[in-house]
């Protein structure tokens, strides 16, 4: 049964299909560990999995696991990047086959470039009408993409974008999205693990945020909040966010994140201090700009 601790958590599964994360020395999560993670997630009431065609073997791995507990999770997947409209139907069918599902909760365009194509949007709507999914939308990186969607009255049900202690660019848009009845999923709450790196050993690319990471660790320590709990709770404290997508590389990490909610009130008390860590430097905020 879903609990207050897990109501907003969605489980990101990129590490189930790829070697992913700047602070993940374990590499791709092995299938037996995936099974343990999913069993625990279901037990704790986490009800949504986030995956994508581009996440290596993630959909196939999930399909094998979901066959053992077919009704435990809703699945959100993403189309291949830079897809063309005529290929959307086949891509959805391929993903559903790998996942072993007749219907997904949602399919998202993996990039805004694809979603701006009317044929892609029409194909997603057609697939929704045919019952292959309940919702459709897009994964974005830039606030201007959200503004374009709203300004042009583009229909969509669900949007996903990054939000974390450093990356708060989308916060001003949350009320607009909720006013338009859009379901909001955020990702990158741990920024691929950047926040957990030893500040003294940061790659040169991250030198501009060395002092901020030190200060963030000091704030967590002085507030008696584990850093991972502070990071996750910061996102969960936004009522306009429906799901916070978190990736884990082990069962222990998931347990730690489930328990983060016990620190929610402590996090709330220092929320203004946390918000002060916001950055605008996209070379730090967007991992595809990283040079490590």
Image (cartoon, rainbow, N blue to C red):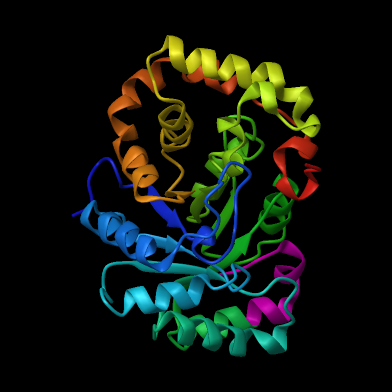
Q: On the rendered structure, is 59 left or right of 211?
A: left
Q: On the rendered structure, is 268 left or right of 204?
A: left
Q: Residue furthest front?
A: 26
Q: Residue furthest left?
A: 1
Q: Which residues are magenta?
A: 107-122
Decide which of 139, 209 is in the foreground and name it. 209
Up-down relation of residue 72 to residue 275 (above or below) = below
Q: Position of residue 45 (x, y in %)?
A: 25, 54
Q: On the rendered structure, is 235 left or right of 170?
A: left
Decide which of 88, 151 is in the foreground and name it. 88
In which image quadrant can residue 267 be found?
top left
Based on the picture, tell me whether residue 119 belongs to the magenta stretch: yes
Decide which of 53, 31 is in the foreground and name it. 31
In which image quadrant can residue 32 be found?
bottom left
Residue at x 31%, y 43% (from the top left corner): 255
- The answer to whether residue 163 is seen in the rendering is no
Q: Position of residue 7 (x, y in %)?
A: 31, 47
Residue at x 54%, y 67% (from the top left corner): 17
Based on the picture, tell me whether residue 288 belongs to the magenta stretch: no
Q: On the rendered structure, is 84 left or right of 247?
A: right
Residue at x 75%, y 33% (from the top left corner): 203
Quarter of the N terminus within the rendering: bottom left
Residue at x 29%, y 36% (from the top left corner): 259
Q: Position of residue 207 (x, y in %)?
A: 78, 25
Up-down relation of residue 64 to residue 188 (above or below) = below
Q: Position of residue 153 (x, y in %)?
A: 66, 62
- The answer to whether residue 18 is seen in the rendering is yes
């Amino acid at each position: 049964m879903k609990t207050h601790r897990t109501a907003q958590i969605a489980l990101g599964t990129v590490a189930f299909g790829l070697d992913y994360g700047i602070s993940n020395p374990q590499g791709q999560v092995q299938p037996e560990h995936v099974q343990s993670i999913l069993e625990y997630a279901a037990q704790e009431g986490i009800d949504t999995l986030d995956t994508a065609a581009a996440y290596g073997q993630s959909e196939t791995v999930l399909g094998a696991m979901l066959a053992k507990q077919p009704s435990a999770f809703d699945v959100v997947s993403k189309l291949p990047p830079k897809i063309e409209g005529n290929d959307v139907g086949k891509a959805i069918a391929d993903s559903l086959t790998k996942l072993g599902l007749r219907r997904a909760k949602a399919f998202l365009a993996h990039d805004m470039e694809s979603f701006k194509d009317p044929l892609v949007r029409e194909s997603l709507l057609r697939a929704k009408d045919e019952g292959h999914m309940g919702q459709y939308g897009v994964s974005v990186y830039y606030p201007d993409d959200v503004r374009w969607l709203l300004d042009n009255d583009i229909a969509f049900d669900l949007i996903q974008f990054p939000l974390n202690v450093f990356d708060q660019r989308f916060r001003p848009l949350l009320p607009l999205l909720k006013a338009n009845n859009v379901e909001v999923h955020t990702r990158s709450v741990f920024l691929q693990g950047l926040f957990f790196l030893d500040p003294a050993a940061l790659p040169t690319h991250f030198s501009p945020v060395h002092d901020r990471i030190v200060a963030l660790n000091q704030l967590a320590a002085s507030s008696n909040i584990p850093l991972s709990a502070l990071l996750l709770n910061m996102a969960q404290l936004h009522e306009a966010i429906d799901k916070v997508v978190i990736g884990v590389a082990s069962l222990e990490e998931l347990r730690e994140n489930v328990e983060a909610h016990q620190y929610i009130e402590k996090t709330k008390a220092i929320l203004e201090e946390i918000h002060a860590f916001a950055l605008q430097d996209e070379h730090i905020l967007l991992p595809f700009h990283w040079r490590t």
